[in-house]
Amino acid sequence: MKDEAVTMEKIVALCKRRGFIFPSSEIYGGIGSSYDYGHYGVLLKNNVKERWWHALLRERDDVVALDSAIIQHPRTWEASGHIAGFTDPLVDCRTCKLRFRADRLEDAACGRKPSLHPGQGPDCDLTESRNFNLMFKTTVGPVQDEGATVYLRPETAQGIFLNFRHYLQFARKRPPFGIAQVGKSFRNEITPGNFVFRMREFEQMEMEFFVPPDQAGHWYEFWRQARYDWYVRLGIRPDHLRLRAHEASELSHYSSATSDVEYLYPIGWQELEGIANRGNFDLTQHTEHSHQNLEYVDSASGERYLPYVIEPAAGADRATLAFLCDAYDEDQIEGETRTVLRLHPLLAPVKAAVLPLVKRDGQPELAREVTTLLRDRMQVEYDEGGAIGRRYRRQDEIGTPWSVTVDHQSLEDATVTVRDRDSLAQSRVAIDTLAAELEARLYAPWRSPKLA
Amino acid sequence: MKDEAVTMEKIVALCKRRGFIFPSSEIYGGIGSSYDYGHYGVLLKNNVKERWWHALLRERDDVVALDSAIIQHPRTWEASGHIAGFTDPLVDCRTCKLRFRADRLEDAACGRKPSLHPGQGPDCDLTESRNFNLMFKTTVGPVQDEGATVYLRPETAQGIFLNFRHYLQFARKRPPFGIAQVGKSFRNEITPGNFVFRMREFEQMEMEFFVPPDQAGHWYEFWRQARYDWYVRLGIRPDHLRLRAHEASELSHYSSATSDVEYLYPIGWQELEGIANRGNFDLTQHTEHSHQNLEYVDSASGERYLPYVIEPAAGADRATLAFLCDAYDEDQIEGETRTVLRLHPLLAPVKAAVLPLVKRDGQPELAREVTTLLRDRMQVEYDEGGAIGRRYRRQDEIGTPWSVTVDHQSLEDATVTVRDRDSLAQSRVAIDTLAAELEARLYAPWRSPKLA
């Protein structure tokens, strides 16, 4: 069961208070459904992306990376079907000039007559519904006519299909292999919302895994499980996570099977990541539209085929939000309520805080030295301001797994105390083994077994 | 003097051949001045960005991170002056419908009458010059009228000024301190070119360092030198790098001093990064346009002021190109010309290649185990295909600093040979100390001195 203590309001408040995430352009009144990541938010989200790369590029031999442009050739979106079909049905209100989704009028409210649209009262002057494309359109370069209309990509995936041929050549890859990409995508949606869960500008982590057609079923099952496991390895509680296979009626026309990894957000079960068997739909479309042969040809056997594609498509913002929600906890310490983010140490924005117990007797100087010792190995923070208990709480709120305290004894025997965020246990560690000790705690659970 | 061997053509060819960088949307004929980063290009550019973060966030206590939206409130660009002044003077050709920079007509060529524009021959039907804004314009959200026109940011810097207030609060920062950001920017330029040196869509690494007004001169000098040193630390040869202070006539109206770090690209000396003393221009503008007080108030002394800003603004693509150009070398080995990228190990896309000498006798199996041992610590590549000499050359071309070879002796005494990319020296290392040995070689030159 979802912890009752965690509400979206609490997450939003913590994010703003501690500078993880706050509304964009706030000094100008904001810009709807757009958020900026502050210091700890950047560090956290960078760690999420880094772990995604790690699971695909570092741990595997069969995945390579790509970073394609946000503005691609406009024919990309003809081939992909986005120009024709990536639409929402919309109505305009002639009174307030706002636009609403025709299929979600129950959520709509007229800007001038607030009670109007719910139920579409008789005074409410709505236009007929028409399809409105969700791609942001702009104009590029020196040509004046329509040929220069381009789009901000609504997904990173198509950039991968456009470059597929290159990877057969330079990367000497043969299916099964994957191409992975992290980057911004843009969707001009009418009713985004729920904090960073749905934004007009968002960051994706997508992979297209190209396989021989007869292996598509096997790899679909493989990636479903592997992607589910990734969240569990990074600390999401299994009872807050589920794999849900789409019903036949939910499937896109090009997909023979899709599963969502769903997370139990404070707003309920929502999609965190989709894993789809896209068949050879995309490569077929781009073959037709580009008149290029995108087949894989096996030089030994002469076999040739259009690979099938398994696509795990994750959202970096949604994943970050899920990790925040799942880590959020409140407990009681010494009669006070403590807010603590129990983030996996590899995701935590700051790995260790170095705190002199008092601001004299050489403690700040030694604590600075300890900070220097650690900072090349991990993100650390030095803090000498305020009572020690308050400094611990501050670190608890941003999820710092270890607080390293320099005290009177440190000056005598060159040891420090290491306080654990979750167990609150304190242990004394020699300064000269501290970096290695913390690195071991940080990486050990993730690292592969050593050679015997 | 610049090495004659390095030409832009050679760099472009290597980048395409080995999948560092290739033209965007190529299967649809490309889209001008837009490039995609392939596998090794992503790894290299990620390392460049990671080292930038490392120098600012890890090594210092006075810099924090931000990741603001690409689409900001449009009033941002009124305040910054971009709507009024971020323009190029352009003329249209009525014959070919192309647009050209009025101040660079010597580079222009009519699409239909190729010899026309150079010199503006009498048949050439050009319009009067008018100013054309370089910001990409698009429309956001549900409102139909002009109010919904927004821009893709032409620089990341303004997002920092918009959020400045937040950082005084949550980050408990007081000047001098910096806010750093990495992200895409977009400029709809007419004549970009020179590979990734100038693209319409590009990635910036910018910091705004806020200081008390009377410290602006000191910090300007500090960041000029620190940013120059960063390139040298990462292996750029000092004689390919220079700091050039702008003449008074070159300065923007808001800047009292600007210096460029320039690199000797194959196309000549060009700007790699600019370091500007922007005074309090931006905070003044945003104060006026937002009617918010952006002053820093010292709670102890009651002192209040608008901080001055020192801005080191670097391009991730330009830096990546400079590192590639500077690393490019050709030498002679055993009578053959070898192409080698002498990249700093921390920048190299792959740190170590693991190669079984022959594809039998248990060597591939042991080499796989060695790969597993290393892969959690660094990006590694396993390669068993082809003659060993050819596999070495392949790694040399992508700049891999160490090749680890598993041979007959490895099966007997659990040692491997480590070949150095630059010196070609080979040394035998015990497998159980290999990871630590390579990590030491990788990080040692960068790490701070240990405590005595």
Image: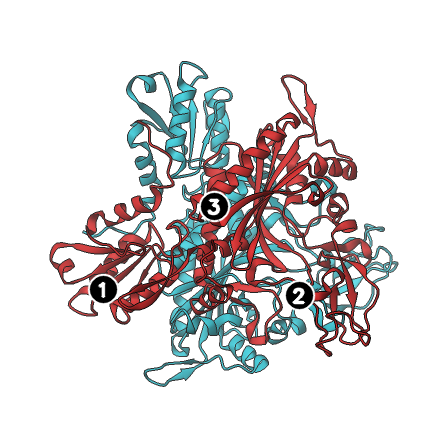
Chain colours: A cyan, B red
For image coordinates 46% across by 42% down, the residue present is: B54
**Looking at the picture, do discs 1 and 3 lie on one chain?**
yes
The amino acid beneath tag 3 is Tyr
Question: Left or right: B171 with respect to A210?
Answer: right
Q: Is residue A4 among the parts visible in the rendering? A: no
Chain designation of label 2: A
Badge 1 local density, few (<14 within 10 Å), some, or many (20+)?
Answer: many
Name the foreground residue: A266 vs B380: B380
Residue located beneath label 2 in the image:
A151
Whole-percent x and y of residue B14? 44, 66
Between disc 1 and disc 3, the foreground one is 3
Residue at the far bottom: name it: A302
Residue B308 on image: x %, y %: 66, 32
Q: Chain of mark 1?
A: B
| Tags 1 and 2 touching, CB below 8 Å | no
Name the secondary structure under disc 2.
Answer: strand
> Which residue corresponds to mark 1?
B356
* Residue A180, placed above or below residue B82: below
State the CA–CA distance, disc 2 to disc 3.
36 Å
Mark 2, residues whose alpha carbon is within 10 Å: few (<14), some, or many (≥20)? many
Q: Amino acid at mark 2?
A: Tyr
Task: Give the residue drawn at x 43%, y 82%.
Answer: A305
Give the mark toward the camera: 1 or 2.
1
Q: Secondary structure at mark 1?
A: strand
Q: Residues within 10 Å of mark 3 (few under 14, many from 20)?
A: many
Residue A245 drawn at (x, y percent): 48, 65
- The residue singled out by tag 3 in the image is B231
Q: Is A350 in front, or is B311? A: B311
User: In this rendering, which labeled residue sits more in front, label 2 or label 3?
Assistant: 3
Residue under the image location 67 percent in, 50 percent down: A33
* Position above or below: A409 against B16: above
Is residue B147 in view from this perspective?
A: yes
